[in-house]
Image (tube, rainbow, N blue to C red):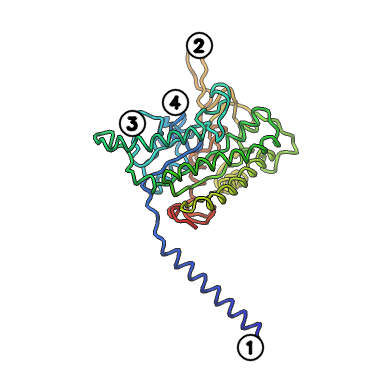
Amino acid sequence: MTPDSQRKIFLAALLLLLVNLLSVSARSKTPCEFPAIFNFGDSNSDTGGLSAAFGQAGPPHGESFFHGPAGRYCDGRLIIDFIAESLGLPYLCAFLDALGSNFTHGANFATAGSTIRPQNTTLQQSGFSPISLNVQFYQFNDFHRRSQIIRSQGGVFGGLMPKAEDFSRALYTFDIGQNDLTSGYFLNMTTDEVRAYVPELLDQFKTIIKGIYDQGGRSFWIHNTGPVGCLPYVMDRLLITAAQVDETGCATPFNDVAQYFNWKLKEAVFQLRKELPKAALTYVDIYTLKYDLISHARKHGFEHPLRACCGHGGKYNFNAHFGCGSKIKVKGKEIMIARSCKDPSVMINWDGVHYTQAANKWVFDRIVDGSYSDPVIPLTMACHRR
């Protein structure tokens, strides 16, 4: 046997040994038992925050699952709902919802229209929420402190609060950033100007993660942002040239900015791992999945990938003046003109801005096992550091 052959056999044996050791190590880790979820974000994960503060998202929102409005800008469940289901937890109540809320298993601080960076406009002026990520953190901070005071007092209200130890054992989920990008464009900024403030956004994001870590948070599940250039409300409102449209029909400049944001977000998560040694931070690539779903819609069982299910007119069935559920008066009688499509289960986009329950479920089914995560770790193991 030649020296070269011996070396190859040795390397093969060493590789096999390493694989076996890694396999044993993976099996030795027990699944995480998350007693609660604390969620931060925008409309992609809002389960009733904006509705509680500024008025309910009316019919036909919620029709496919809740059979009526449920605080979600969707026909049914969101990815965060499927996350809760998979962990055996109830759907998250919005922190801002004072009616019938039970916070035993966590709370949702997300509100539709939220941004990482505070907006200098009102909701009526821009459509973006004043409840930015720093405000959501202030709410969490207050909730953390006061919930334990209420719990110590006992009674009915005390029983609706999480246990003190649940804050360190909980899963902290994030899905925010999309509105930071679109808000810049809606203020007539150029692509270069939007890109320029992305590092500042991520600095603010890291500050929030560190703040939660300082309060005992250890397990973080962080979604990147989706392909905003494929959303009807972006393509309808922002001018682009034919050369800026890709083969799927999406606007390339806006998707390029989203990918830049995601690249910087991944860098931020990597840096946080160095600075927060006890934290388990999982970065989840939502962008790749959503773009694959849109660009290969028929292959995945969906139709009209760039068209809203619930809307009124236009190329994308989207009209900024007549959003999903809009009504007009005809001879003194209210008539809904922005209705739901016949079958939301085969549509990807719900209302020009958000995804349908079916699309949310499709995405969730592919992230739950960790296939699109860094590190490659399933949701049920997200408390383990790499």
What's the CA distance linking mark 3 and mark 1? 76 Å
What secondary structure is found at the residue carrying circle 3? loop
Residue 1 shows which numbered tag?
Answer: 1
Residue type at the position of mark 1: Met
Q: Crowdedness of circle 2 by 10 Å Cα count: few (<14), some, many (20+)?
A: few
Q: Where 69 sits versus 33, above or below?
A: above
Mark number, residue 13: none
Asked if residue 4 is positioned above or below residue 204 in the image, the reply reads below
Q: Which residue is mark 3?
A: 100
Asked which secondary structure carries label 2, the reply is: loop
Please provide percent x and percent y for residue 361. 48, 45
Q: Earlier in the sequence, mark 2 or mark 3?
A: 3
- Residue behind mark 2: 331
- The image position of residue 101, as x and y in percent, is 35, 33
Q: Is residue 60 left or right of residue 102?
A: right
Residue at the image point whose x is 59% and y is 34% from the top? 180
Badge 1 local density, few (<14 within 10 Å), some, or many (20+)?
few
Residue in front for this viewpoint, 58 or 301: 58
Q: Quadrant of residue 206?
A: top right
Q: Residue at x 42, y 32 (%)?
A: 70
Residue named by callout 4: 53
Taking the view exactly as shown, the residue that stands out farthest to the bottom is 1
